[in-house]
Amino acid sequence: MLLKTGGAVLLALSGLGGGWLFARRLRLRRDFLTAFLTFLSQLATALRYRRDAVYTLVNSSGELFEIPPSDFTLPFAEAWDKQLHTLPAKWKLRARDMELLRDFGARLGTTDTQGQLEHIALYQALFQKQLAQAREDITQKARLYQALGLFIGVSAALTLL
């Protein structure tokens, strides 16, 4: 009987852990979007005060994106897109997030300084909307995921008993 009870408790806890992991995915996305908005702000500041190449500006604007020097021979949009392939698995980004990131990199560095600053401002506004949605998702869904995970774990435990 002790073994069944222990197994039931472990099942309930594993269900809770699964719910917690789903809620964590929401927080990871929020954290990425917050970091990306900081990156955009730093990039705009660097662009205003320095006239370096886009690669240098991106690499100096934080640790979120680091384009290796070996990719400096590629067109910037291509190097940016190559860098994006490492993001979805780590940050749990949605398709719309990735689409915005690709579009941002595809057009960065293609106009004069004022045009680039306007481009950055546009994407700051777009990513602010994404961040607001991510925060709303956390508010609405994080507890739900945890409760559902616990419910599934307890249901499986009761079935075992």
Image (tube, rainbow, N blue to C red):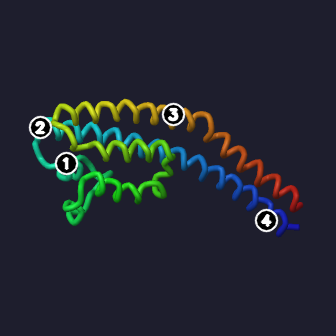
Q: Are marks 1 and 2 in contact (CB under 8 Å)?
A: no
Residue 23 falls left or right of residue 86: right
Residue 146 image offset from top left, x and y in percent: 66, 46
Label ID, residue 7: 4
Sequence-wise, the earlier of marks 4 and 2 is: 4
Check contact, mark 3 vs mark 1: CB within 8 A: no
Counting residues from the start of the chain, the first of labels 3 and 1 encountered is: 1
What residue is shown with label 2?
A: 49
SS class of the residue under badge 1? helix
Task: Please tell me which residue is depicted at 11% across the width and 37% down the height of the picture.
Answer: 49
Q: Residue at x 38, y 47 (%)?
A: 102
Tell which tag, 4 or 2, sits nearer the viewer. Answer: 2
Q: Nearer the viewer, mark 3 or mark 1?
A: 1
Kindly state the secondary structure of the residue where label 2 is placed. helix
Q: Amino acid at mark 3?
A: Gln
Relative to 77, say whether 46 is above or below: above
Name the residue type under label 4: Gly
Q: CA distance from mark 3 to mark 1?
A: 30 Å
Q: What percent of the width, then of the height, locates residue 82?
A: 34, 59
Q: Which mark lies nearer to you, 1 or 2?
A: 1
Tag nearer the camera, 3 or 4: 3
Find residue 54 and name its label.
1
| Residue 56 horizontal side relative to residue 31, left or right | left
Do the residues under discs 4 and 2 have CB atoms within 8 angstroms? no
Answer with the quarter of the image where residue 137 lies.
top right
The answer to which of 60 and 126 lies nearer the viewer is 126
Front in this rendered view, residue 96 or 135: 96
Q: Left or right: 100 with respect to 111?
A: right
